[in-house]
Amino acid sequence: MINEVFIKHLGVSIESWLNYISAVGREYVLSESSIKLPLAEFIGTKIADTEAVKLEYLHPFFFMKRFDLYLERTVNDINYKTAFEFKYIKDASTLDKVEKQRIFNDLMRLYYFKKYTDGSCKVYFLICGTQYEFEQSFQKIPTYISSIEPRADSPKEEVKISGFYTEWFKFDYKDSEQTIQLNIGEGSVHKSFYTDFF
């Protein structure tokens, strides 16, 4: 069964692989496509049925759209389905309008797969890149550790969040889901991305 510990190990494995590639001076091979293979290999070392791992798997609900990585296994008569989408941030690519649309489209395709798939289903979106790239696009988004709540007597600080991706990636420590309001006004910077997806 795919569990949270396994997913954390998956994250550590890709971090180790990216650090190795960087250490040997081969950053030029890094892209969204290049991180699929080591992750598929890692999963293959953890499960007996390597045929269950699929790269570029056709999305069941969207014509000619594919998941970067897909895993489907049956354990104890339960069918487990897991879909992955990856992004590799390079040269401030996430600041580009086309890449912003691609990220939103990936998130929505994962959402529809999760919502309309029968049985046990999990979806993951993994962003990789240098610390500098994260600071430019994602570092302004607050993150919380789900098992730790603020002390009752701690002063309440208003967290100011900014950045284009905040709406899509901020998660409250008490809630494991992020709600995106698609019916937003014309003045929103996100409106065109929502409209273009549909």
Image: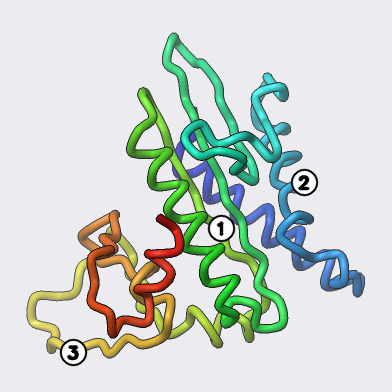
Q: In the rendering, which numbered label is found on residue 37? A: 2
Please, what secondary structure does the residue beneath circle 1 have? strand
Q: Earlier in the sequence, mark 2 or mark 1?
A: 2
- Measured as percent of width and height from the top left, residue 26 is found at 90, 70
Disc assigned to residue 50: none
Contact, CB < 8 Å: mark 2 with mark 3?
A: no
Position above or below: 96 against 115: below
Q: How crowded is mark 2: few (under 14 residues within 10 Å), some or many (20 or more)?
A: few
Q: Name which residue type carries label 3.
A: Glu
Question: Could you tell me how many numbered marks the image carries?
Answer: 3
The residue mark sitting in front, 1 or 3, is 1
Q: Mark 3 points at which residue?
A: 157
Q: Earlier in the sequence, mark 1 or mark 3?
A: 1
Residue 110 in picture, x, y percent from top left: 45, 46
Mark 2 to mark 1 CA distance (whole Å): 14 Å
The residues tagged by marks 2 and 3 sit, at their Cα atoms, a distance apart of 43 Å
Figure check: 166 above or below 16: below
Amino acid type, callout 2: Leu
Q: In which image quadrant can residue 155 be found?
A: bottom left
Q: Describe residue 170's horizontal placement relative to residue 96 as left or right.
A: left
Image location of residue 48, percent across then percent down: 68, 20
Report the residue marked by disc 1: 126
**In the rendered view of the protein, which quadrant contains the C terminus?**
bottom left
Q: Looking at the image, is mark 2 or mark 3 nearer the viewer?
A: 2
Residue neighbourhood size for the residue with mark 1, other residues' Cα within 10 Å, grouped as few (<14), some (14–19), many (≥20) = few
Residue 133, above or below 34: below
Which sits earlier in the primary sequence, circle 2 or circle 3?
A: 2
Image point (68%, 52%), residue name: 13
Between 122 and 164, the one nearer to me in the picture: 164
Instruction: Give the residue displayed 29% in from the left and 54% down from the top.
Output: 176
- The amino acid type of the residue labelled 1 equals Leu
Question: Where does the image place residue 171, in percent across and percent down from the top left?
Answer: 31, 66
